[in-house]
Image (spheres, grey):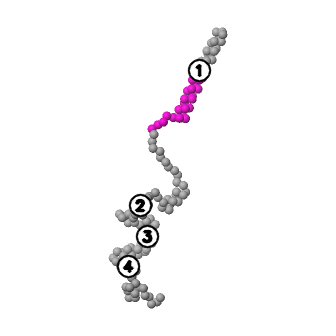
Amino acid sequence: MTEDFEERLVAAFEQMATALTGIHDTQEKQFAKQWPERKEVHEAIYSRVPTTEDLVREEQGASDESLDDWLTVPEEEEYIGEREREFLKTHPKSAASAQALDEDEAEGRSTAAPEDQAGSDGVPAGDHPTV
C-alpha cells in the first residue's frame, strides 16, 4: 500500500463516520417524534356525539335515572309535569275547574253522588225516569 492510498482510505473512513453520525442523529429525532416520552398520566374522558336515536329518546323523556327515582313522587314540590303546565296555561278554564274539583274533594264534597243518596235534583242518582 502506498502512502497516498492510505491517506485516501483514512479520508473515506472519516467521511463515512460523519455520514453515519448524521444518520444516527436523524434517526434519534424521528424516534423522539414518533414515540415521545410519556407525560403525566391522567384519567381518560369518554365522550361521543349523540346520534339521532339518542336525540329522539331524549326528546321523549328518556334519562339515566333509576326506576326508583321514576316511581317515587317528590313530596316537597307540586308534581305537575311540563306538558300539564303548558296545557293549563293554554286552557285557563280547565285549570279553574280542575282547581275547583280539587277543593271540593278536599272538603268532602264530590260530583259523583252514591247511588242510594239523592242527587241535587232530588232524584236518586242511580234511577233516572228518562232512561
**Picture disc at residue 17:** 1
Q: Is residue 20 magenta?
A: yes
The magenta segment is: 19-40
Label 3 vs label 4: CA separation? 22 Å
Which residue is the site of mark 2? 69
Residue at point 48%, 60% (across, down): 62
Look at mark 4 in the image and give the residue it sits on: 110
The disc labelled 4 sits on which kind of residue?
Ser
Give the structural element (helix, strand or loop) at label 4.
loop
Q: Dot 4, crowdedness within 10 Å: few (<14), some or many (≥20)?
A: few
Q: Where does the image place residue 108, in percent across and percent down from the top left?
A: 34, 77
Q: Residue at x 66, y 10 (%)?
A: 1
Classify residue 21 by image quadrant: top right
For label 2, the crowd category at 10 Å Cα-Cα, with few meaning under 14, some 14 to 19 and many 20 or more, is: few
Residue 96 seen by the camera = no
Determine the secondary structure under disc 3. helix
What is the spatial separation of the Cα atoms under label 4 and label 1, in whole angstroms? 106 Å
Q: Residue at x 54, y 30 (%)?
A: 29
On residue 88, the disc is: 3
Which comes sooner in the sequence, label 4 or label 1? 1
Label located before the other in sequence (1 or 3):
1
For label 3, the crowd category at 10 Å Cα-Cα, with few meaning under 14, some 14 to 19 and many 20 or more, is some
Drawn side of residue 53 relative to residue 75, left or right:
right
**Is 107 placed left or right of 29 in the picture?**
left
**In the image, which is nearer the foreground, mark 3 or mark 2?**
2
Q: Secondary structure at mark 2?
A: helix
Query: Of 27 and 64, which appears nearest the observer?
Result: 64
Asked if labels 2 and 4 touch by Cβ distance under 8 angstroms, the answer is no
